[in-house]
Amino acid sequence: MAETAIIGGGISGLATAYFLEQNGAKDIILLEAGAETGGKLKTRKTQHYLIEEGPDAYVAAKPVIGKLIEKLDLQQEVIAPQHNTFFIYSGKKLQEVPAGLSALVPADIGAFLRTELISWQGKIRLVLERLVPSAKGTEDESLAAFIERRFGREMLQKLAGPLFAGIHAGGANELSLEASFPQFRKMEKEFGSITKAVLTRRKQNPTPPPIFHSFKNGMQTLPDAIRQHLKQTSVIMGAKVRSIAYFRDKWHIQTESTQIEAEKVILAVPAFTASEILSQLDKPLSAALGSIRHSSSTIITFGFRQEQVQNPLKGTGFLVPAPEQENISAVTFSSAKWAGRAAQAHVLFRAFLNKNKKFRKTDTESIMGSVQKELSGILGIEGVPELTDLRHWANGQPVYDMEHLQRVNHIETLLLQHPGIHVTGASYRGAGIADCVRQAKEVAEKVSA
């Protein structure tokens, strides 16, 4: 019988196993339904390109992931973006976002005043943000309501909406501020203004490091390194869990081919998968897990020869505001953003499909054709790509809507009825890689205690 069984071999499950071992656990079983661990952190290499099938970066500012990278001895593998600018595709042209404006407060006043992205009325409204009174009370609000209240509608529609909704699944009008960007509410309460908060932090740290980092050989470097460091964990592949039951003072985990016994169980899978696994054990808990919303995403990767692309690609990519979206919601200039993503004289792009476009496998060729045509028109690309690759993640991202935190609180209350069962992962209290690592560390400490 295992001391702890972990269901799910993505970054959450692997990190949980790692932290359990760090806390002294000796007998761990990790069950992964697929043929490989790593979850969405998948990197594939071709002759000329390095392709990320999932996330291409992590938030470096969150301490827990930095400490993990140090323990895994990966510091030499970490890379920062080669550019710190990006664009908004608005009015049928790419417009550079002035420095600092991604934090909602311009760092270069001259560039801010010159930009055509925001009208003069919008610029004045942004500057007046420091005079907007703080919200009274503790009631949550949508991200859109917060941005519009503090910075105005134009800032929401032109920049903040596409930027922050691109980080989290869902539109800005449905995202909970407390669930998705709690730091904004904290800044408002502490400083009375986002502008004052950002300017204060810039004085304290005039040259902050880039927000996002990646790895020389792609994001799969992280889960691969974690697995290599596991010494007390037995990883079983192709072990899809059907159900969990408790009798004779232990948990019985039924897979498609065998039954495994454990003292404690950690479900490091999406909430809807946990819902299916626990459906026979506790129907109210299963229903609560199933109520957490998820959104699908589609990434189309293109590789071209450098001579085919007219745009100089002096940035990390561009976003498209929702009212102007056709097929594309965002594009990453992968080979310009990160070193080593394309061979010399080649360029690599990742285009994200507009979520209003429903994906069907039968439409794969037409989707790639439509996206390629739109991308070529925006960037002045001639001819056909050397590489085309489509990755659809069905229900791949949780939507932190206005009811999300209430759902998570309810789930955590129901779990108290089942000592020994825990959940962790992107579905709950942080969807990014760094947040998944943090939650894995927290659940490992809870289980170890």
Image (cartoon, rainbow, N blue to C red):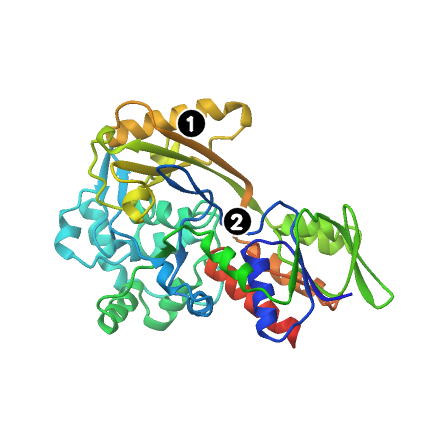
Tell me if mark 2 has few (under 14), some (14-19) or many (20+) residues whose alpha carbon lies within 10 angstroms of its own. many
Query: Would residue 411 appear left or right of 70 to someone viewing this image?
Result: right
Task: Specify which label sits upstream in the sequence, 2 or 1.
Answer: 1
User: Tag on residue 211?
Assistant: none
Q: As displayed, is residue 68 above or below residue 221?
A: below
Left or right of residue 102, residue 439 in this image: right
| Image position, residue 269 (x, y; %) | 62, 53
- Up the image or down, 167 lies above or below 368; here it is below
Distance in Å between CA atoms under marks 2 and 1? 26 Å
Q: Position of residue 344 (x, y in %)?
A: 26, 40
Pinpoint residue 354: horizontal percent, then vertical percent: 42, 35
- Mark 1 lies on a secondary structure that is helix
> What residue sits right under mark 1 in the picture?
368
Amino acid type at image mark 1: Met
Q: Residue at x 51, y 63 (%)?
A: 437
Depth-wise, is mark 2 or mark 1 nearer the camera? 1
Tell which of 348 and 399 is nearer to you.
Answer: 348
Quadrant placement of the C terminus: bottom right
Q: Secondary structure at mark 2?
A: loop
- Under mark 2, the amino acid is Val
Residue at 29% x, 63% y is: 209
Q: Which residue is mark 2?
A: 399
Residue 141 visible in image: no
- Judge left or right: residue 429 versus residue 46: right
Up the image or down, 392 lies above or below 16; here it is above
Q: Residue at x 21, y 51 (%)?
A: 98
Label 1: few (<14), some or many (≥20) within 10 Å?
many
Residue furthest to the front in view is 47
